[in-house]
């Protein structure tokens, strides 16, 4: 148990949103709301792309990154994440059966 919860209380873990988006750059992934992703998509699709884009991530942090650093905007729904987990689980089981240690 974290000793600081004695003094500050536990913030709790809010449930993750059903749908969020990932803003991918070469070295990081930033989680944003669908509305923020839509606004970013409009910004980077402009003919004259701005040098910087400013937005708030899902955790309330203000972000400012170069627009050209964004390499992907990806939607992540609860159903997609469930299917991805099932795929990884099946690959791990298959890898164990085959003796392939890549997915074990």
Image (spheres, rainbow, N blue to C red):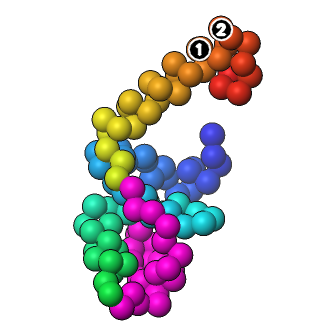
Q: Residue at x 52, y 22 (%)?
A: 89
Give residue 65's position: percent from left, percent from top.
51, 80
Give residue 70's position: percent from left, percent from top.
48, 71
Q: Residue at x 38, y 31 (%)?
A: 82
The crowding category of the residue bearing disc 2, from other C-alpha atoms within 10 Å (few below 14, some 14 to 19, many at least 20), is: few
The crowding category of the residue bearing disc 1, from other C-alpha atoms within 10 Å (few below 14, some 14 to 19, many at least 20), is: some
User: Residue 12 versus residue 54: which sits nearer the camera?
Assistant: 54
- Asked if the residues shown at circle 2 and circle 1 are in contact, with their CB atoms under 8 angstroms apart, the answer is yes
Where's the C terminus, which quadrant?
top right
Residues in magenta, as a range: 48-74
Examine the rendered structure and indicate whether residue 80 appears above or below residue 101. below
Where's the N terminus, which quadrant?
top right
User: Residue 48 versus residue 89: which sits nearer the camera?
Assistant: 48
**Residue on which disc 2 sits:** 97
Asked whether residue 34 is drawn in magenta, I would say no
86 displayed left or right of 46 = right
Give residue 51's position: percent from left, percent from top.
47, 90
Asked if residue 58 shows in the view, the reply is no
**Residue on which disc 1 sits:** 93
14 displayed left or right of 101 = left
Q: Residue at x 31, y 44 (%)?
A: 77
Q: Secondary structure at mark 2?
A: helix
């Amino acid at each position: 148990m974290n000793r600081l919860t004695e003094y500050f209380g536990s913030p709790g873990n809010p449930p993750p949103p059903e749908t969020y988006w990932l803003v991918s750059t070469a070295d990081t992934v930033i989680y944003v709301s669908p509305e923020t992703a839509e606004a970013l998509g409009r910004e980077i699709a402009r003919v004259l792309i701005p040098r910087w884009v400013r937005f708030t991530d899902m955790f309330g942090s203000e972000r400012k990154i170069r627009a050209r650093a964004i390499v992907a905007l990806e939607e992540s729904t609860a159903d997609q994440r469930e299917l991805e987990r099932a795929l990884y689980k099946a690959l791990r089981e298959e890898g164990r059966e085959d003796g392939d240690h890549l997915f074990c």
